Amino acid sequence: MKSILVLLAAGAVIAGASDAGAEPMFLAKQYTRCTTCHYSATGGGLLTPYGRSVSHQELSTWGGDHTKPAQPGTASGTGEEAFLYGVLGDTLGPVQLGIDLRPGRLQYWFEGTSSGQNILMTADLLAAYQKDGWTLYGEIGRKPDVAGGNVDSYEYWASRQWDTGFGFRAGRFLPAYGINFADHTAFNRAFLGFDVYDQVYGVEVSQTTDHYLLQASVSPGRADSIINNDGTRAFTTAGRLQFDLTPRTFLVASGLYRGASQVEGGNSAVGLALGFAPFRWLSVQTEGDAQFQRGADAFTDYVVVNETAFEVVRGMWFKFSPQFRTSQGSSANGVFRTVYEADLLPRTHWNVDVSYYRDDSRSTQLITHTLLAQIHLYL
């Protein structure tokens, strides 16, 4: 029982430590594609100049003014939204930098026992160079864990995008699959193998039009398994097809295959997700997945995740996320999670987030409560 608590708390400790700013709730603002504001095709990480401008003009409570956001593909080294508030101006030219800091407070309790700690979940430097269709991207910073942290580079890649819509990427990245919710402990991410350190070394090809985005990748295995040679390396391929039905509605079909490793059996997954925003202040997104475990003890797990986000006033979002996962193919042994979250974006470079998790384990009858408060500084 105690080991279950530790695992749940450890997951919440680094909640939000990766993919900072990857918020699917902004579908309500007619942003169906991650690349509208981010360099990465799978979302999160460094914002483009246009993404920084949007965060200033449209998303923060008091950051905006009457000027229009910079157009996609344009450089912006000045203004409040720029790197270090524009202190360097345009001296870096096509190089874009960002600093991502995320201190927080974790508190958890169950059956009359409670504990808490102050944590630094993220302290990263992010950089991108973009010119003539080429993008070079990298992140380096503190690798968070329960025992401490050390410096690590967990995402770096090079990509090329052609005017025809065809794209190519190679390096270390997270494969495209489903909805990339900001919380990497969400059941459609952590349990399917898309947690904070599940990037792969691989290549990805893509095709994009005004109405759809197709992404497919192949890899010899998870990056850390290759670096550490821990026996978990396994061939991995993933595919994601997104249809933009309206400016505020998308449908996503995904597939994943992992081969067997030296210590683990293989698995595969298929998923279907729907996101729609009937108003500029409401976003509803749901994903359902089936994961097939192969081997002697084959079984099928099912995951369902919903996130409903409501903007009370500009820059103040309330989110509700029910999540369910079966265990060993049995719903009686599953886990039901309920998340309540308040996300406040008062100014361009920082926001405050408070999340409450209630995890109900059907097999052990253990209910774990977790409260996570964090300040996100994006400079």
Image: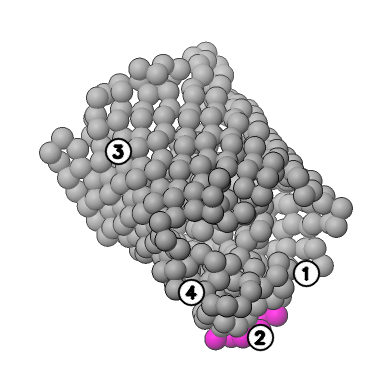
Secondary structure found at label 1: strand
Mark 1: which amino acid?
A: Lys
Mark before the other along the chain sequence, 4 or 1 = 4
> Which residue is depicted at the point 44% across and 55% down?
311
- How far across and down, in percent of the image, does residue 312 sit? 40, 56
Indicate the quadrant containing the N terminus: top left, top right, bottom left or bottom right: top left
Disc 3 target residue = 358
Residue occupied by mark 2 = 91
One can see residue 237 in this view = yes
Crowdedness of circle 4 by 10 Å Cα count: few (<14), some, many (20+)?
some
116 or 59: nearer the viewer: 59
Q: Which residue in the protein does label 4 denote?
A: 63
Q: Secondary structure at mark 4?
A: loop
Q: Say if mark 4 contacts mark 1, CB within 8 Å.
A: no
Magenta span: 87-93
Judged left or right of residue 41, residue 265 is: left
N-terminal of the two: label 2 or label 1?
Answer: 2
10 Å neighbourhood of mark 1: few (<14), some, or many (≥20)? few
The residue labelled by disc 1 is 131
Location of residue 70 (image quadrant): bottom right
Query: Of circles 4 and 3, which is in front?
Result: 4
**Cα gap from disc 4 to disc 3, whole angstroms:** 33 Å
Amino acid type of the residue tagged 2 in the rendering? Thr
